[in-house]
Image (tube, grey):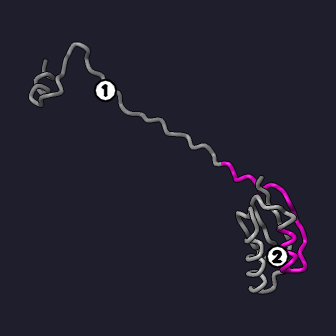
C-alpha cells in the first residue's frame, strides 16, 4: 500500500540534503522523495515502511520530527471534456432521380432531367 511519510528535518546546508537523500533513497519501496527547503520537510512516497524511513533519517540527521504518515493525496480529477456535436449539412436527393457517380458528363446531364 502506498503511503506518504512527511518528516520535519533541519536542513541547514547542501551536504545535509545530499546525505539524507542518499540514505532514504536506498530503502526498499521508496518511489518518490521531495525536499521542501522553505518548510524544512522531507516527503517520502512509496511502499516503504514508515518506521524504517524514520529510523534511517535519524541515523543521518539526529533532529527529525514526524509530521504525518498516511495515504498520499488523490490527484485532482479532470473535468470531463464534452465533445462538440458535429453539425454537417444534410444533402437531400430527390428519390426518383438517379445520379451516377462514375462520370462527370453524366452528372451534368442528370441535373437537367
Whether residue 109 appears in magenta in the rendering, the answer is no
- Residue 94 position within the rendered picture, expressed as x and y whole percent measured from the top left: 25, 17
Whether residue 68 appears in magenta in the rendering, the answer is yes
Up/down of 2 relative to 96, above or below: below
Q: Is residue 112 left or right of 40 when viewed as pictured?
A: left
- Residue 104 position within the rendered picture, expressed as x and y whole percent measured from the top left: 12, 31
How far apart, in angstroms, are the residues tagged by discs 1 and 2? 68 Å
Q: Quadrant of residue 4?
A: bottom right
Q: Nearer the viewer, residue 2 or 10?
A: 2
Q: Residue furthest top?
A: 96
- Residue 35 position within the rendered picture, expressed as x and y whole percent measured from the top left: 75, 73
- Report the quarter where the C terminus lies: top left
- Secondary element type, mark 1: loop
Question: Would you call the spot at circle 1 few (<14 residues within 10 Å), some (14-19), or many (20 or more)?
Answer: few
The residue under the point 73% across, 77% down is 22
Question: Which segment did they paint magenta?
Answer: 53-77
Q: Nearer the viewer, residue 7 or 22?
A: 22
- Residue position marked by numbered label 1 in the rendering: 91
Question: Would you call the spot at circle 2 few (<14 residues within 10 Å), some (14-19), or many (20 or more)?
Answer: few
Q: Which of pointers 1 and 2 indicates the residue nearer the eye?
A: 2
Up/down of 69 relative to 82, above or below: below
Up/down of 51 relative to 15, above or below: above
The residue under the point 90% across, 78% down is 63
Q: Is residue 44 left or right of 83 when viewed as pictured?
A: right
Q: Earlier in the sequence, mark 1 or mark 2?
A: 2
- Secondary element type, mark 2: loop
Q: Is residue 93 left or right of 8 when viewed as pictured?
A: left
Tell me if label 1 and label 2 are in contact, CB under 8 Å: no
Q: Nearer the viewer, residue 38 or 95?
A: 38
- Residue 30 position within the rendered picture, expressed as x and y whole percent measured from the top left: 74, 64
- Residue position marked by numbered label 2 in the rendering: 40
Up/down of 80 relative to 13, above or below: above
Amino acid at each position: 500500500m502506498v503511503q506518504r511519510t512527511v518528516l520535519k528535518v533541519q536542513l541547514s546546508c547542501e551536504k545535509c540534503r545530499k546525505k539524507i537523500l542518499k540514505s532514504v533513497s536506498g530503502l526498499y519501496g521508496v518511489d518518490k522523495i521531495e525536499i521542501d527547503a522553505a518548510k524544512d520537510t522531507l516527503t517520502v512516497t512509496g511502499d516503504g515502511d514508515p518506521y524504517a524511513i524514520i529510523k534511517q533519517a535519524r541515523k543521518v540527521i539526529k533532529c527529525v520530527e514526524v509530521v504525518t504518515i498516511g495515504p498520499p493525496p488523490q490527484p485532482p480529477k479532470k473535468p470531463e471534456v464534452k465533445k462538440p456535436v458535429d453539425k454537417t449539412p444534410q444533402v437531400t436527393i430527390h428519390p426518383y432521380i438517379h445520379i451516377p457517380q462514375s462520370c462527370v458528363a453524366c452528372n451534368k446531364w442528370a441535373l437537367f432531367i
